């Protein structure tokens, strides 16, 4: 089941990207263009959620399958190095919302400052080179202009980082840390499965995720406490 869902997310991301690049002309007056951009951003988010589940061994029982899908989905998301992501994410779960947590920014709880620090910690020169190469390969494809590549590939990727950061890092772990957040210092969304899926693949059920990281994203709603 995990392998099927992971492959479906990856194929949906690639298929919709190709459809946009070749079939959606950039037209500010066309409302469908904006809906397609938002959908592609959502699929970008799905790529990272897939890599995240691979980090926890939730894709398949075989470790090599999780590693393979983790490397592929994190690379497609933004040229990211899966091994480094997995190491930092392990620290996040070990020391959530503390100075030892690489995702937590103690000096400031301001959204943009924290997001900037978050991006600074994770973005590497090699990653930027990979993204630049990918961009230049895209615009070599007949019919794919620079504007299309920016609107339909680069912009959705940026929007996805904002979605992931807000739902998976900033909102659940920001100060103040209340007793209701539990030992992992993690908030959780109120019980609303359609909104939880739409907002970030049930990742807003964040305390439940920290309570049991071995629950895959598509089953997080089954562990949701009433709130």
Image (tube, rainbow, N blue to C red):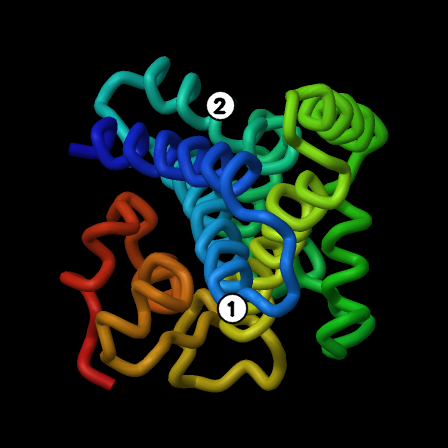
Image quadrant assignment for residue 202 = bottom left
Residue 117: image location, x then y, percent? 80, 58
- The residue lying at 51 percent from left, 23 percent from top is 71
Label 2–label 1 contact, CB within 8 A: no
Q: Nearer the viewer, residue 44 or 107?
A: 44
How many tags in the picture? 2
Assign a secondary structure to mark 1: helix
Residue 44 at what x, y percent from top left? 50, 45
Q: How far apart are labels 2 and 1 at the CA level?
A: 32 Å
Left or right, 68 with respect to 76, comes to left
Above-or-below relation of 20 to 188:
above
Depicted 154 relative to depicted 197: above or below: above
Seen from the viewer's position, the closer of residues 114 and 92 is 114
Mark 1 is surrounded, within 10 Å at the Cα level, by few (under 14), some (14 to 19) or many (20 or more) other residues, namely: few
Q: Residue at x 38, y 60 (%)?
A: 203
Residue 74, relative to residue 101: is it above or below? above
Q: Earlier in the sequence, mark 2 or mark 1?
A: 1
Disc 2 on helix, strand or loop? helix
Pick the front one: 148 or 213: 148
Q: Image height check: is 71 above or below 180?
A: above
Q: Which residue is mark 2?
A: 72
Residue at point 80% right, 34% down?
Answer: 124
Name the front one of labels 2 and 1.
1
Residue 177 percent coordinates (x, y): 55, 81
The C terminus appears in which quarter of the rendering? bottom left
Question: Would you identify the image quadrant in which residue 27 lies?
Answer: bottom right
Provide the residue designation for mark 1. Answer: 31
Viewport quadrant of the N terminus: top left
């Amino acid at each position: 089941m995990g392998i099927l869902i992971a492959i479906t997310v990856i194929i949906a991301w690639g298929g919709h990207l190709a459809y946009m690049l070749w079939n959606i002309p950039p037209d500010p007056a066309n409302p469908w263009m904006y809906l397609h951009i938002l959908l592609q951003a959502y699929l970008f988010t799905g790529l990272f959620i897939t890599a995240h589940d691979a980090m926890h061994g939730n894709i398949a029982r075989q470790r090599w399958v999780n590693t393979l899908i983790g490397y592929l989905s994190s690379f497609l998301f933004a040229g990211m190095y899966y091994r480094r992501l997995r190491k930092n994410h392990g620290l996040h779960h070990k020391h959530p919302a503390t100075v030892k947590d690489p995702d937590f920014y103690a000096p400031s709880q301001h959204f943009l400052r924290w997001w900037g620090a978050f991006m600074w910690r994770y973005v590497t020169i090699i990653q930027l080179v990979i993204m630049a190469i990918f961009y230049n390969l895209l615009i070599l494809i007949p019919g794919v202009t620079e504007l299309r590549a920016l609107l339909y590939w680069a912009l959705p990727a940026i929007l996805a980082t904002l979605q992931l950061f807000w739902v998976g890092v900033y909102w659940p772990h920001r100060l103040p840390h209340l007793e209701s957040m539990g030992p992992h210092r993690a908030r959780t969304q109120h019980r609303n499965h359609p909104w939880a899926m739409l907002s970030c693949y049930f990742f807003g059920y964040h305390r439940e995720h920290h309570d049991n990281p071995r629950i895959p994203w598509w089953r997080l709603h089954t562990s949701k406490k009433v709130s």
